[in-house]
């Protein structure tokens, strides 16, 4: 039987717990294709089979704010997102949670060339636009168009 021990200091509102249940951490060796100039190499390894579009934050929509989030994501051997890191975002922090919540639901399938299901790190930019052709100078400067149509095709 697994036991959980908790220490409750009387003078602090902090709870400290320890479990006797062993936690297994799996180390995955990723092929790093996260550099922007390597985005076109991703399609040699994985194809998106399920894409979930992020929800637009209500506050951003009401204020007509466009932006983007550039995420580095690990695609594991089963074709699932295994962790992410926000590389950059504009406006900073506004769209991060929504982009990450959608990205972790994506799924990929290994290509014929990737018979060993090689896990990779890649970057994905999610754009949040209030119009098809945003004219906001901040958006245009911070959210460059990237040709990733092959690596993100459904």
Image (tube, rainbow, N blue to C red):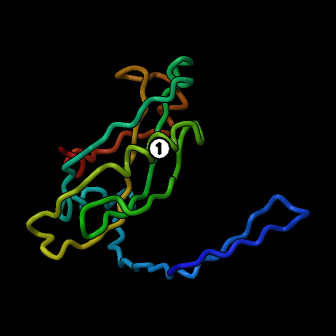
Image position of 44 (left or right of 133): left
Residue at (45%, 78%) from the top-left corner? 25
Which residue was labeled with disc 1?
Answer: 69
Tell me the residue at 53%/79% (across/down): 2
- Residue 104: horizontal and vertical position, in percent? 38, 52
Dividing the picture into quadrants, the one containing residue 38 is: bottom left
Q: Nearer the viewer, residue 147 or 60?
A: 60
Q: Nearer the viewer, residue 98 or 143?
A: 98
Q: Residue furthest left?
A: 112
SS of the residue at dot 1? strand
Left or right: where does residue 106 sit relative to residue 84? left
Q: Nearer the viewer, residue 40 or 47?
A: 47
Disc 1: CA contacts within 10 A as few (<14), some (14-19) or many (>=20): many
Q: Position of residue 82 (x, y in %)?
A: 38, 63
Identify the residue at horizontal 13%, vertical 63% (top origin).
Answer: 111
Residue 105 percent location from the top left of the image: 33, 49
Q: In front: 38, or 109? A: 109
Q: Is residue 115 left or right of residue 58?
A: left
Which x, y percent locates residue 136?
Answer: 51, 24
Quadrant including the C terminus = top left
């Amino acid at each position: 039987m697994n036991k959980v021990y908790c220490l409750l200091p009387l003078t602090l509102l902090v709870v400290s717990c320890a479990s006797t249940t062993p936690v297994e951490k799996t180390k995955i060796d990723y092929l790093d294709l996260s550099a922007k100039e390597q985005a076109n190499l991703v399609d040699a390894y994985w194809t998106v089979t399920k894409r979930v579009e992020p929800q637009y934050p209500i506050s951003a929509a009401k204020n007509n704010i466009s932006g983007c989030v550039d995420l580095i994501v690990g695609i594991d051997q089963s074709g699932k997102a295994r962790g992410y890191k926000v590389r950059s975002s504009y406006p900073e922090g506004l769209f991060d949670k929504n982009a990450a919540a959608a990205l972790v639901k994506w799924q990929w399938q290994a290509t014929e060339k990737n018979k060993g299901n090689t896990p990779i790190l890649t970057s994905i930019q999610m754009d949040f636009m209030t119009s098809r052709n945003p004219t906001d100078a901040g958006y245009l400067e911070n959210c460059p168009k990237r040709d990733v149509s092959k690596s993100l095709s459904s």
